[in-house]
Amino acid sequence: MRVVISGHARKRLRDNRQGSITRDDIIGVAQQIPGQIPTATRFRGYIAKSGRLFDIVAKDIPGGRLVITIIGK
């Protein structure tokens, strides 16, 4: 499945709170979520390779799965 990371999510990856979360972490998590996501939904409790906990908000669009934002813990 193709994963599209929004501009807002890319900007958040540069913030200190999400500092050790990588694009690869986000893409891997988004691809692992089963089924269809018709509306923006928050998925909680993922762990980046660096050990940082994070949540993502994602939604399915015709072009793939859109990651709207990332919330670091």
Image (cartoon, grey):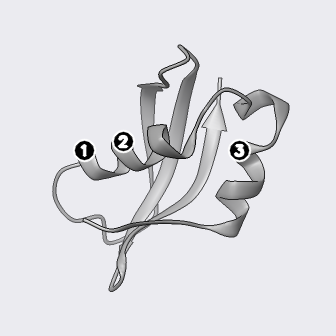
Q: Callout 2, which amino acid? A: Val
Q: Is residue 71 left or right of residue 11?
A: left
Name the residue at 53% across, 13% down: 51
Q: CA distance from mark 2 to mark 1?
A: 5 Å
Q: Is residue 24 left or right of residue 14?
A: left
Q: CA distance from mark 3 to mark 2?
A: 15 Å
Up-down relation of residue 64 to residue 25 (above or below):
below
| Quarter occupied by residue 32 | top left
Q: Residues within 10 Å of mark 1 (few under 14, many from 20)?
A: few
Cβ atoms at labels 1 and 3 below 8 Å apart:
no
Q: Which residue position holds label 1? A: 32
Q: Which residue position holds label 3? A: 13
Looking at the picture, tell me which residue is in the foreground, 10 or 59.
Answer: 10
Cβ atoms at labels 3 and 2 below 8 Å apart:
no
Task: Give percent across and percent down for residue 14.
Answer: 79, 43
Q: CA distance from mark 1 to mark 3?
A: 20 Å
Give the residue at the far left of this rendering.
35
Cβ atoms at labels 2 and 1 below 8 Å apart:
yes
Q: Callout 1, which amino acid? A: Gln
Element at label 3: helix
Q: Quadrant of the N terminus?
A: bottom left
Looking at the picture, tell me which residue is in the foreground, 49 or 68.
Answer: 49
Q: Which residue position holds label 2? A: 29
